[in-house]
Image: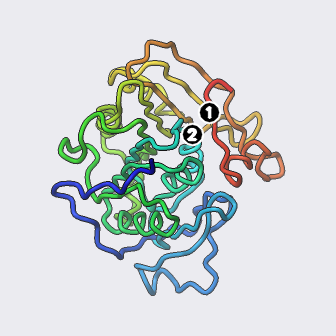
Amino acid sequence: MAPTAAPPLPGHPAAPAGGGRHDPAAPSASGGDVPATGQPSPDDLPDAESSGTLLGGRVAYRQMLRGHRSGLEPVLLAALVPARPGQRVLEGGTGAGAGLLCLAARVAPLGGWGIEMDPALAALARRNLDANGAAGISVAAADLTRDDVLPEGGFHHAFANPPWHRGTASPDAGRDLARRAAPGLLALWVAALCRRVRPRGSVTLAVPAAALAEAAGLLRQSGCGGVSLLPLWPRRGIAARIVLVQGVLGSRAGSIVNPGLVLHEADGRFTPEADAVLRDGAALRIGG
């Protein structure tokens, strides 16, 4: 049976439409800058959006011209979530919805929620999901770490690309909210995600290599075992800057370091393995 759309969260009405951000250097998850031919300057229209696609054109995707923009991480993160048709998923910090969109394109039907602090981004994510027919997934403008946002144990899988930047604040408030982590924020996010998955459910994170040990330790503290690491190598012989980390709630299995994924050839093209995920929507597998 296809999952039905989730009801509104108590105390968290649907986010209003509008808003905008800009990061002109950010690549789209499909491997290049999001097409913006004919788009107005973001300085002229701060609420402007750009139109592009994910997964080689399978997913229509709009995002803000100003502020935080999607990179490769949400596409790769979604590829590691071991969801099956009919299950319920939760994404923390869903942004404009790239991760949920890619997961829903690979696994259908799918139900669940995306939680996003920025009301404008939450509204855009909802429109993106609607445009791609992901009727079973809802989005709320809310704080993931609040206990009253969602019931505990209601999801088969949870995933997030938490804020991680610990340097100087960005002058753009939206980008700063998406990227910069206050002390202790990662612990709050991991605990919130783990509380909301069922026993044997998975929690998957994309974190910088510098936060790898902290993230793995927090998953274990929150009751997850079988912690698996999947490094994302920019090129062969280059240290991984981002690592995907996954734990299973209640598992007693030991940890595993997977071979990882090399993203680019020496000439800058995507490797065939990366292309299969980023353009063809293939899943990433633990242990392979």
Q: Is residue 166 visible?
A: no
Residue 82, compared with residue 264, is above or below; it is: above
Question: What residue is shown with label 1?
Answer: 231
Q: Nearer the viewer, residue 154 or 39?
A: 154
Q: Quadrant of residue 200?
A: top left
Left or right of residue 196, residue 74 in this image? right
Q: Residue furthest right?
A: 267
Left or right of residue 287, residue 266 in this image? right
Percent coordinates x, y for residue 252 in the rendering:
44, 12
Q: Quadrant of residue 5?
A: bottom left
- The answer for how far apart the CA atoms under marks 1 and 2 are is 6 Å
**Looking at the picture, which amino acid does disc 1 mark?**
Pro
Left or right of residue 167, residue 73 in this image? right
Question: What residue is shown with label 2?
Answer: 242
How many callouts does the rendering have? Answer: 2
**Looking at the picture, which amino acid does disc 2 mark?**
Ile
